[in-house]
Protein backbone atom coordinates (compact mmCIF):
# COMPACT_ATOMS: atom_id res chain seq x y z
CA UNK A 1 0.00 0.00 0.00
CA UNK A 2 0.94 3.66 -0.03
CA UNK A 3 0.74 6.75 2.17
CA UNK A 4 -2.35 7.44 4.24
CA UNK A 5 -5.55 8.90 2.81
CA UNK A 6 -5.10 12.41 4.09
CA UNK A 7 -4.58 15.33 1.82
CA UNK A 8 -7.35 16.75 -0.38
CA UNK A 9 -6.31 17.61 -3.92
CA UNK A 10 -6.35 21.32 -3.05
CA UNK A 11 -3.81 21.02 -0.24
CA UNK A 12 -0.07 20.42 -0.28
CA UNK A 13 1.18 18.52 2.77
CA UNK A 14 3.89 15.86 2.76
CA UNK A 15 3.28 13.01 5.20
CA UNK A 16 4.61 9.49 5.43
CA UNK A 17 3.04 6.41 6.94
CA UNK A 18 3.88 2.93 8.01
CA UNK A 19 0.96 1.89 5.87
CA UNK A 20 -0.37 3.25 2.59
CA UNK A 21 -1.75 6.38 0.92
CA UNK A 22 -4.06 8.31 3.27
CA UNK A 23 -7.78 8.22 2.52
CA UNK A 24 -9.46 11.48 1.77
CA UNK A 25 -12.73 11.20 -0.20
CA UNK A 26 -15.79 9.17 -0.96
CA UNK A 27 -15.72 7.58 -4.42
CA UNK A 28 -18.21 8.76 -7.02
CA UNK A 29 -19.58 5.28 -7.77
CA UNK A 30 -22.39 3.97 -5.54
CA UNK A 31 -22.08 7.07 -3.32
CA UNK A 32 -24.76 9.55 -2.27
CA UNK A 33 -24.86 12.81 -0.28
CA UNK A 34 -25.21 12.36 3.48
CA UNK A 35 -27.04 15.39 4.89
CA UNK A 36 -28.61 13.17 7.58
CA UNK A 37 -25.20 12.21 9.01
CA UNK A 38 -24.96 15.38 11.06
CA UNK A 39 -22.49 13.82 13.50
CA UNK A 40 -19.91 13.55 10.69
CA UNK A 41 -17.73 16.62 10.25
CA UNK A 42 -14.75 18.07 8.43
CA UNK A 43 -11.44 19.01 10.04
CA UNK A 44 -10.42 22.50 8.87
CA UNK A 45 -6.78 23.50 9.45
CA UNK A 46 -5.13 26.92 9.53
CA UNK A 47 -1.35 26.78 9.18
CA UNK A 48 1.77 28.68 8.14
CA UNK A 49 2.86 27.11 4.86
CA UNK A 50 5.82 29.33 3.95
CA UNK A 51 7.70 30.07 7.21
CA UNK A 52 7.03 33.76 6.70
CA UNK A 53 4.99 35.35 9.51
CA UNK A 54 4.39 38.41 7.34
CA UNK A 55 2.23 36.46 4.89
CA UNK A 56 -1.22 35.09 5.72
CA UNK A 57 -1.58 31.53 6.91
CA UNK A 58 -3.31 29.03 4.70
CA UNK A 59 -6.67 27.50 5.66
CA UNK A 60 -8.38 24.48 4.15
CA UNK A 61 -10.35 21.37 5.02
CA UNK A 62 -8.03 18.40 5.49
CA UNK A 63 -9.76 15.35 6.92
CA UNK A 64 -13.02 13.94 8.16
CA UNK A 65 -14.17 12.82 11.60
CA UNK A 66 -17.11 12.12 13.87
CA UNK A 67 -18.62 13.65 16.99
CA UNK A 68 -18.60 10.94 19.66
CA UNK A 69 -20.09 13.10 22.40
CA UNK A 70 -21.20 16.73 22.71
CA UNK A 71 -17.65 18.14 22.64
CA UNK A 72 -15.34 15.43 21.23
CA UNK A 73 -14.50 15.07 17.53
CA UNK A 74 -12.75 11.80 16.71
CA UNK A 75 -10.33 11.72 13.78
CA UNK A 76 -6.90 10.34 12.76
CA UNK A 77 -3.57 11.32 14.32
CA UNK A 78 -1.96 11.78 10.92
CA UNK A 79 -4.47 14.60 10.38
CA UNK A 80 -3.43 16.51 13.51
CA UNK A 81 0.33 15.96 13.75
CA UNK A 82 3.44 17.31 11.98
CA UNK A 83 2.04 20.82 11.42
CA UNK A 84 3.98 24.06 11.76
CA UNK A 85 3.97 25.80 15.12
CA UNK A 86 0.83 27.85 15.66
CA UNK A 87 -1.50 25.54 13.74
CA UNK A 88 -5.20 25.97 14.54
CA UNK A 89 -7.91 23.33 14.18
CA UNK A 90 -11.58 23.95 13.45
CA UNK A 91 -14.45 21.49 13.05
CA UNK A 92 -17.36 22.04 10.68
CA UNK A 93 -20.50 19.90 10.69
CA UNK A 94 -21.80 21.53 7.51
CA UNK A 95 -22.89 19.38 4.57
CA UNK A 96 -20.75 21.42 2.13
CA UNK A 97 -17.65 22.75 3.88
CA UNK A 98 -15.98 23.68 0.59
CA UNK A 99 -18.81 26.07 -0.30
CA UNK A 100 -18.59 27.59 3.17
CA UNK A 101 -14.83 28.08 2.83
CA UNK A 102 -15.25 29.71 -0.58
CA UNK A 103 -17.88 32.13 0.74
CA UNK A 104 -15.85 32.95 3.87
CA UNK A 105 -12.69 33.59 1.82
CA UNK A 106 -14.60 36.17 -0.24
CA UNK A 107 -16.04 37.78 2.88
CA UNK A 108 -12.72 37.85 4.79
CA UNK A 109 -9.89 38.17 2.23
CA UNK A 110 -6.45 37.71 3.74
CA UNK A 111 -7.85 36.84 7.18
CA UNK A 112 -7.67 33.06 7.66
CA UNK A 113 -8.66 33.25 11.32
CA UNK A 114 -11.90 35.00 10.37
CA UNK A 115 -12.47 32.34 7.70
CA UNK A 116 -11.94 29.61 10.28
CA UNK A 117 -14.37 31.21 12.72
CA UNK A 118 -16.94 31.62 9.94
CA UNK A 119 -16.88 27.99 8.87
CA UNK A 120 -16.19 26.07 12.07
CA UNK A 121 -15.66 25.89 15.80
CA UNK A 122 -12.06 26.00 17.03
CA UNK A 123 -10.77 23.23 19.26
CA UNK A 124 -7.66 21.64 20.76
CA UNK A 125 -6.22 18.46 19.29
CA UNK A 126 -4.96 15.55 21.40
CA UNK A 127 -3.04 12.82 19.59
CA UNK A 128 -2.29 9.30 20.75
CA UNK A 129 1.26 9.80 22.11
CA UNK A 130 2.26 6.38 20.71
CA UNK A 131 1.58 7.52 17.12
CA UNK A 132 2.97 6.59 14.54
CA UNK A 133 3.39 3.17 16.08
CA UNK A 134 4.01 0.36 13.61
CA UNK A 135 2.19 -1.68 10.98
CA UNK A 136 0.58 -3.90 13.62
CA UNK A 137 -0.79 -0.92 15.55
CA UNK A 138 -0.27 2.57 14.16
CA UNK A 139 -2.01 4.34 17.08
CA UNK A 140 -3.37 6.61 14.32
CA UNK A 141 -6.12 8.18 16.38
CA UNK A 142 -6.76 11.64 17.81
CA UNK A 143 -9.53 13.83 19.14
CA UNK A 144 -10.30 17.52 18.92
CA UNK A 145 -11.89 18.88 22.08
CA UNK A 146 -14.43 21.59 21.31
CA UNK A 147 -16.61 24.01 23.27
CA UNK A 148 -19.96 22.19 23.42
CA UNK A 149 -22.03 25.38 23.67
CA UNK A 150 -20.47 26.84 20.52
CA UNK A 151 -21.15 23.62 18.61
CA UNK A 152 -24.74 23.40 19.83
CA UNK A 153 -25.36 27.02 18.81
CA UNK A 154 -24.46 26.21 15.19
CA UNK A 155 -25.43 22.59 14.50
CA UNK A 156 -27.82 19.97 15.77
CA UNK A 157 -26.43 16.43 15.92
CA UNK A 158 -26.64 13.16 17.81
CA UNK A 159 -23.19 11.79 18.72
CA UNK A 160 -22.20 8.48 17.20
CA UNK A 161 -22.49 5.25 19.18
CA UNK A 162 -19.17 3.57 19.91
CA UNK A 163 -18.74 -0.23 20.03
CA UNK A 164 -18.26 -2.36 23.11
CA UNK A 165 -14.81 -3.78 23.71
CA UNK A 166 -13.98 -6.53 21.21
CA UNK A 167 -17.36 -6.33 19.49
CA UNK A 168 -15.99 -7.12 16.02
CA UNK A 169 -14.12 -10.13 17.41
CA UNK A 170 -17.36 -11.37 18.93
CA UNK A 171 -19.06 -11.28 15.54
CA UNK A 172 -16.10 -12.83 13.76
CA UNK A 173 -15.50 -12.87 10.00
CA UNK A 174 -18.59 -14.93 9.20
CA UNK A 175 -20.84 -12.64 11.21
CA UNK A 176 -19.22 -9.52 9.76
CA UNK A 177 -19.89 -10.78 6.22
CA UNK A 178 -23.59 -10.24 6.94
CA UNK A 179 -23.18 -6.79 8.55
CA UNK A 180 -24.04 -3.67 6.50
CA UNK A 181 -21.10 -1.24 6.55
CA UNK A 182 -21.12 2.43 5.47
CA UNK A 183 -18.19 4.79 5.06
CA UNK A 184 -18.71 8.56 5.21
CA UNK A 185 -16.56 11.64 4.76
CA UNK A 186 -15.69 14.74 2.78
CA UNK A 187 -12.95 13.26 0.62
CA UNK A 188 -12.23 13.33 -3.05
CA UNK A 189 -13.22 10.85 -5.73
CA UNK A 190 -11.33 7.91 -7.16
CA UNK A 191 -8.49 8.53 -9.60
CA UNK A 192 -9.45 9.98 -12.99
CA UNK A 193 -7.01 9.92 -15.90
CA UNK A 194 -6.55 13.13 -17.87
CA UNK A 195 -4.01 14.91 -20.07
CA UNK A 196 -1.87 15.77 -17.05
CA UNK A 197 -2.09 12.33 -15.45
CA UNK A 198 -4.27 11.11 -12.61
CA UNK A 199 -6.32 13.53 -10.51
CA UNK A 200 -8.77 13.08 -7.65
CA UNK A 201 -11.66 15.49 -8.30
CA UNK A 202 -14.31 16.67 -5.91
CA UNK A 203 -14.20 16.74 -2.14
CA UNK A 204 -15.48 19.05 0.55
CA UNK A 205 -19.04 17.69 0.54
CA UNK A 206 -20.25 15.08 3.05
CA UNK A 207 -20.95 11.81 1.23
CA UNK A 208 -21.55 8.17 2.15
CA UNK A 209 -21.18 4.83 0.41
CA UNK A 210 -21.73 1.16 1.22
CA UNK A 211 -18.68 -1.01 1.79
CA UNK A 212 -18.30 -4.73 2.44
CA UNK A 213 -16.32 -6.72 4.98
CA UNK A 214 -12.97 -8.07 3.83
CA UNK A 215 -10.67 -8.95 6.74
CA UNK A 216 -10.12 -8.38 10.46
CA UNK A 217 -7.02 -8.35 12.62
CA UNK A 218 -6.12 -7.00 16.04
CA UNK A 219 -6.36 -3.28 15.22
CA UNK A 220 -7.56 -3.09 11.59
CA UNK A 221 -10.73 -3.87 9.70
CA UNK A 222 -10.39 -3.97 5.91
CA UNK A 223 -13.42 -3.19 3.80
CA UNK A 224 -14.14 -3.87 0.14
CA UNK A 225 -14.98 -0.78 -1.93
CA UNK A 226 -15.24 -2.35 -5.40
CA UNK A 227 -17.97 -1.08 -7.71
CA UNK A 228 -19.19 -4.42 -9.19
CA UNK A 229 -20.28 -5.55 -5.72
CA UNK A 230 -22.34 -2.38 -5.29
CA UNK A 231 -19.82 -0.78 -2.96
CA UNK A 232 -18.28 2.67 -2.89
CA UNK A 233 -15.42 3.69 -0.67
CA UNK A 234 -13.05 6.21 0.84
CA UNK A 235 -10.36 8.33 -0.80
CA UNK A 236 -8.19 11.38 -0.07
CA UNK A 237 -9.70 13.59 2.65
CA UNK A 238 -11.76 10.80 4.22
CA UNK A 239 -9.01 10.04 6.73
CA UNK A 240 -10.34 10.01 10.27
CA UNK A 241 -13.89 9.66 8.98
CA UNK A 242 -16.37 7.06 10.18
CA UNK A 243 -16.95 3.49 9.18
CA UNK A 244 -20.40 2.60 10.50
CA UNK A 245 -21.80 -0.91 10.91
CA UNK A 246 -25.36 -1.86 11.78
CA UNK A 247 -24.89 -4.15 14.78
CA UNK A 248 -27.83 -5.46 16.81
CA UNK A 249 -30.03 -3.10 14.83
CA UNK A 250 -28.05 0.02 15.79
CA UNK A 251 -25.70 2.14 13.67
CA UNK A 252 -22.33 1.88 15.41
CA UNK A 253 -19.08 3.72 14.71
CA UNK A 254 -16.74 0.72 14.56
CA UNK A 255 -13.64 2.17 12.86
CA UNK A 256 -12.04 5.27 11.36
CA UNK A 257 -10.62 5.48 7.84
CA UNK A 258 -6.82 5.57 7.73
CA UNK A 259 -5.54 4.32 4.39
CA UNK A 260 -6.14 2.21 1.30
CA UNK A 261 -4.98 1.74 -2.27
CA UNK A 262 -3.62 4.86 -4.00
CA UNK A 263 -6.24 5.13 -6.79
CA UNK A 264 -9.07 4.63 -4.23
CA UNK A 265 -10.69 1.69 -6.01
CA UNK A 266 -10.24 -1.42 -3.90
CA UNK A 267 -9.81 -1.40 -0.12
CA UNK A 268 -10.51 0.88 2.82
CA UNK A 269 -8.18 0.14 5.76
CA UNK A 270 -9.71 1.39 9.01
CA UNK A 271 -8.60 1.59 12.63
CA UNK A 272 -10.80 -0.46 14.96
CA UNK A 273 -12.44 1.46 17.80
CA UNK A 274 -13.30 -1.68 19.76
CA UNK A 275 -9.59 -2.61 20.11
CA UNK A 276 -7.79 -2.14 23.46
CA UNK A 277 -5.36 0.57 22.32
CA UNK A 278 -8.06 2.70 20.70
CA UNK A 279 -10.24 2.38 23.79
CA UNK A 280 -7.35 3.23 26.10
CA UNK A 281 -6.72 6.42 24.14
CA UNK A 282 -10.40 7.45 23.96
CA UNK A 283 -11.30 6.71 27.59
CA UNK A 284 -10.18 10.07 29.06
CA UNK A 285 -12.26 11.96 26.51
CA UNK A 286 -15.51 10.03 26.06
CA UNK A 287 -17.59 7.52 28.01
CA UNK A 288 -17.11 4.08 26.48
CA UNK A 289 -19.65 1.24 26.44
Image: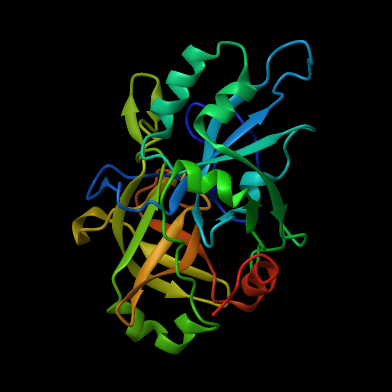
Q: Quadrant of residue 284?
A: bottom right
Whether residue 264 sits left or right of residue 114 in the image: it is: left
User: In the picture, which quadrant includes the C terminus?
Assistant: bottom right
In the depicted structure, whether residue 176 falls above or below residue 232: below
Q: Position of residue 131 (x, y in %)?
A: 72, 58
Give the residue displayed 49% in from the left and 34% down from the top. 8
Q: Position of residue 87 (x, y in %)?
A: 72, 34
Number of residue marks:
0
Q: How is the image coloured?
A: rainbow
Give the residue displayed 43% in from the left and 51% down from the top. 40
> In this orientation, does residue 246 appear?
yes
Can you name the residue that lies furthest to the bottom here? Answer: 170
> In this orientation, does residue 23 appear?
no
Give the residue displayed 51% in from the left and 81% down from the top. 164
In the depicted structure, whether residue 63 falls above or below residue 198: below
Whether residue 161 sits left or right of residue 116 in the image: it is: left
Give the residue displayed 69% in from the left and 23% down from the top. 49
Q: Position of residue 93 (x, y in %)?
A: 45, 44
Q: Nearer the viewer, residue 248 or 255?
A: 248
Q: Nearer the viewer, residue 176 or 37?
A: 37
Q: Quadrant of residue 140?
A: bottom right
Q: Position of residue 28 (x, y in %)?
A: 27, 42
Amino acid sequence: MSLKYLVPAVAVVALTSVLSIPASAINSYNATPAPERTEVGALVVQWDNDDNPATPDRIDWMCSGTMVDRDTFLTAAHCTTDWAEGVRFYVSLAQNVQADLDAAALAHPGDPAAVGAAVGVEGIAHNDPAYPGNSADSHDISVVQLPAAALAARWSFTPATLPAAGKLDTLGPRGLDAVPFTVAGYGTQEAVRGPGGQTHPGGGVRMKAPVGFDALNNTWVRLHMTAPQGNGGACYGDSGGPNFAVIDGKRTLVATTITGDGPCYATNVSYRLDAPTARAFMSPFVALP
